[in-house]
Image (tube, rainbow, N blue to C red):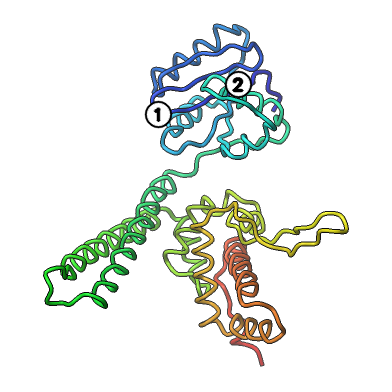
Amino acid sequence: MHYTTFIGIDVSKATIDVYVHKTNHHKKFQNGRRGFDSMISWIQKIDPDLNLNNMHVTFEHTGLYSLHVALFLEEINIDYSMMSALQIKRSLGITRGKNDKIDARRIAEYGYLYRETLQLTKFPSRQIMQLQPLLALRDRLVRQRGGFEATQGEQARFLDRTAALDMSDVYQQVINTLKEQIRRIDDTMKLIIDSNPELKLNYDLVTTIKGIGKTIAIHLIVFTHNFSRFSNWRKFACYAGIAPFENQSGTTFLGKTKVISLANKQMKKMLHLAALCASLHDTEMRSYMARRVQGGKSKMSVMNIIRNKMLARAFAVVARKTPYVDIVKYAA
């Protein structure tokens, strides 16, 4: 697509700052439908000959604050890219000072400079959008449950149960409540998946792999937009922080190949749990780990290899549309 106009939007809770790169115009609008309509009218007033199909909008991913902007642009069929704030920041070079107007201008400049390589953002299906907040809430409740269980265990170990400070019953009630809410969220997510044949098919396929249970399968579906967001498993491995990269320069600095910390840490944790489970219950993975460790490889390095193998299996069964086959069972 040949774009003639590039727009940068700095999104905040109540307002959006809009900057037109072509004409160097700036204006602030409300972060809502009325403000979005006014923005389009203002842009068309600046350039009466503008065709909206030749306009590209760039803005930072700010969670809920940028959601309405994206939905509006999707509704009126304007191409846009919702970018990581860190990616834009690191592309700007040395900068000094900032405010909303300057941020909007820098975002517009980013969109113009990288116009040949920008990837358009497309919203996932309605079911994926329903699963995203549920999964985030579930992860939060699981962390809270773990915190209460740890505190309860420490108090049971060091406090006299007859003392007035014993709050084990209170902790147990809170833990039970959290468990019940987590169960309700799990049931709701399963209903959403079952309501969509494509989601259910991929969910059933990836859960045939030893080590990938219900929760890990839902994480994979949500973060890959049902395996449509990434063209292959290696790109998703990079996103999840399990892809190793070289760390060297010239002939003097030869660092070890290692994974990068810039990653989706929650997805990385889920893949690690899948690898742990597979290394215990999958015959092929268990023997592979024992063989590599015996050969001198560190356990965590082997575990990361297994993470990648599990991810490759998940993408493979989805691509083939057939369940995973444990060929070790059929080996002579």
Rendered-image quadrant of the N terminus: top right
Q: Residue at x 35, y 57 (%)?
A: 138
Rendered-image quadrant of the C terminus: bottom right
Q: Position of residue 222 (x, y in %)?
A: 47, 53
* Amino acid at circle 2: Arg
Q: Which residue is mark 1?
A: 13
Residue 153: name its quadrant: bottom left
Residue 212 is labelled as: none
Q: Is residue 245 above or below residue 17?
A: below
**First in sequence: mark 2 vs mark 1:** 1
Q: Nearer the viewer, residue 1 or 47?
A: 47
Going by the image, does 54 lie left or right of 143? right
Residue 7: name its quadrant: top right
Alpha carbon distance from label 2 to label 1:
19 Å
Going by the image, does 88 lie left or right of 15? right
Q: Position of residue 323 (x, y in %)?
A: 54, 71
Q: Position of residue 128 (x, y in %)?
A: 44, 48
Q: Which residue is mark 2?
A: 105
Label 1 packing within 10 angstroms: few (<14), some (14-19), many (20+): few
**Total number of numbered discs in the rendering:** 2
Q: Position of residue 198 (x, y in %)?
A: 48, 55
State the SS at label 2: helix
Residue 53: name its quadrant: top right
Check if mark 2's residue and mark 1's residue have beta carbons within 8 Å. Answer: no
- The extreme bottom residue here reads 332
* Amino acid at circle 1: Lys
- The extreme right residue here reads 251
